[in-house]
Amino acid sequence: MSVTDNMQNKFSKKSINLTKKKYNYTFNLFLFFYLILGFYFSVNTGMATDEPVDQYIWKLNVEAIKNFFGNNEDGYFNLLEYEARFHGIGFHYISQLYLQLISIIIDFEEFSEDTSKILLNHSLIFFTYFLSGIISKKIVNLIIKDKSYSNLFLVFYLCYPYLLGHGFYNPKDMPFLFGWILSTYISIRIFLKIYRSENVPLLKFLFLSLSTAFVLSIRIPGILILLQYLITFIITSRLIKEPFHKIIKIYFYKIFIFLFFTLLLTFISYPIFWKDPMLIFDAINKMKNFPYGVCTLTLGRCMDAMNLPSSYIFTWLFFKLPFLSLVGLILFPFTEKKIFSQGVQQIILGSILLTTISIIFLLIFLEASLFDELRHILYIVPLILIISFSSIYFFSKKLILYISILSIFSFTIQNINMYPYQYTWLNLFSNFINVNNNFELDYWGVSGRNIANKINNNDQLLRHNDKCIYVAPKHIIEPFISADYNCVKPFFSIYPKSTEKYILVKYTRNIRRENPSNCDLIIEESYNLNLFKDKLIMGKVFICN
């Protein structure tokens, strides 16, 4: 090779490296600004109905901890008597520390301390969503080994309105999803090392213990993550042609350490078990059948959480999954042979696929209580996205490129149009039915902040500012109402007198309930789904005589 050729090759390599650096810099810059914008929009959303309850659970657990150490006489009893006593506080340990630090820098002076904490906590919830996308992208890259397309998956994931909406304010399900995806990634890396006959450091088992305990510390049903580990273990064992007992014998000490620290850290996250560990069995039974009297509007029928048809999960997946996922699942049988031709892909995609299928059918078989569409099994959505994206990639790179770009473009427009109601997003199939009459929408009452702002700026209502505002629950409105209104009461538990003139606020879940007589509609909070003409109604405000 001549000197000229050598110089050209060096220049070409240098040019390629420079292009890669520019690409990485641009992509990282995009992620940085996305994160900053996400923080901003998350703290400017409304307050979900669950969030003050979530904060109250933390306070009850703090009092129970004080009681355990002899500093509060009734603390443990108060927790024991509370209906949601078996919710873990693993994420609270992190969020409370975060709130102590962030409140030094940021303070919403117009709100109370409790409201400020809830709104600031949105930024941490959003960060867990952002990290779940980063980790999901790493899993995809392990499967397809194509960084550019893995980055494309990440952008698609971060723009997907349904997950983004939950990422703004879902205080339990989004951190749970993050913990599940993190545990999936760490466990896959461990089993890949076993498959390659490489040494697995104890530190990796400790990391897996931390992430697994984090999942369990939020909800007891997190124990299903162990099923995923078992499935991955079985696939790996079959590939390396080693019996279970031999692998367990090799890693016995590390597995013991993993189980010990997982149990210990989980136990720390449930102060209710500190005095009576046997309550764990009550917790499992309680969480399987919790709560009573809640139903979710699904295809026009309010489906009771305690008596769901087997079609419930599939119906919501059909309308909540993006078009890309549905295409990927349809194409999977045509790409299965190509995907599973390599052991690495069998371990990763095989375990994710079998886990997703197993969890869905296990929940149906056990008749588990589910409500508020898919929020309690939100963690399977990233798993389905990983499966479907990989399926289309192995079928056709061009097809996944076109579908992803079109989806990202559509998602971007929808996110702008829907904010802050992204979690109510439904795919294009929803255009064939009347969504308002067939599906649950703003069950969290996030519309409360926008409704409050409209009340504050409505001259007609301002003339009646001496009247009480009735809303259920009142905390979705009260923190955001102008000082011009000094009376906010909970509706459905307290009814106004028949002679009283008042302002009635109803968000989607309560809109279906009948109005008192002599009520006039003043404000309607809504948006157009998929930019079509049909309005999705989030809330209404009435003046009632």
Image (cartoon, rainbow, N blue to C red):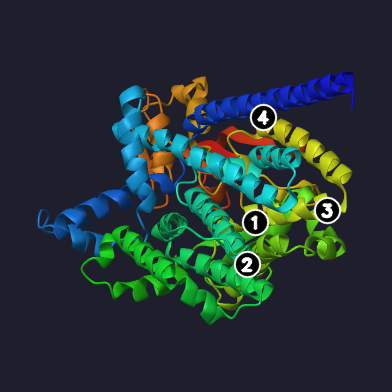
Residue located beneath label 3 in the image: 394
Check if mark 4's residue and mark 2's residue have beta carbons within 8 Å.
no
Mark with earlier residue (1, 2): 2
1 and 3 marks in contact (CB < 8 Å): no
SS for callout 1: helix
Residue receiving disc 2? 355
Residue at 80%, 20% in the rendered image: 11
Left or right for 522, reference 536: left
Residue for point 88% across, 49% down: 396
Kind of element beneath mark 2? helix
- Is residue 17 visible in the rendered structure shown here? yes
> Which comes sooner in the sequence, label 2 or label 3?
2
Mark nearer the viewer, 2 or 3: 3
Q: Nearer the viewer, residue 454 or 23?
A: 23
- State if disc 2 and disc 1 touch (CB < 8 Å): yes
**Relative to 407, residue 184 above or below:** below
Look at the image and tell me whether residue 83 can be seen: no
Q: Are marks 4 and 1 in contact (CB under 8 Å)?
A: no
Look at mark 4 in the image and give the residue it sits on.
416
Is residue 240 shown left or right of residue 93? right
Determine the CA span between mark 3 and mark 4. Answer: 32 Å
Q: How far from the left and from the top, in percent, is residue 244? A: 56, 79
| Amino acid type at mark 1 | Leu
Counting residues from the start of the chain, the first of labels 3 and 4 encountered is 3
The crowd level at tag 4 (other Cα within 10 Å; few <14, some 14-19, many 20+) is: few
Badge 3 marks a residue whose secondary structure is: helix
Q: CA distance from mark 1 to mark 3?
A: 17 Å
CA distance separating discs 1 and 2: 9 Å
Q: Which mark is residue 383?
A: 1
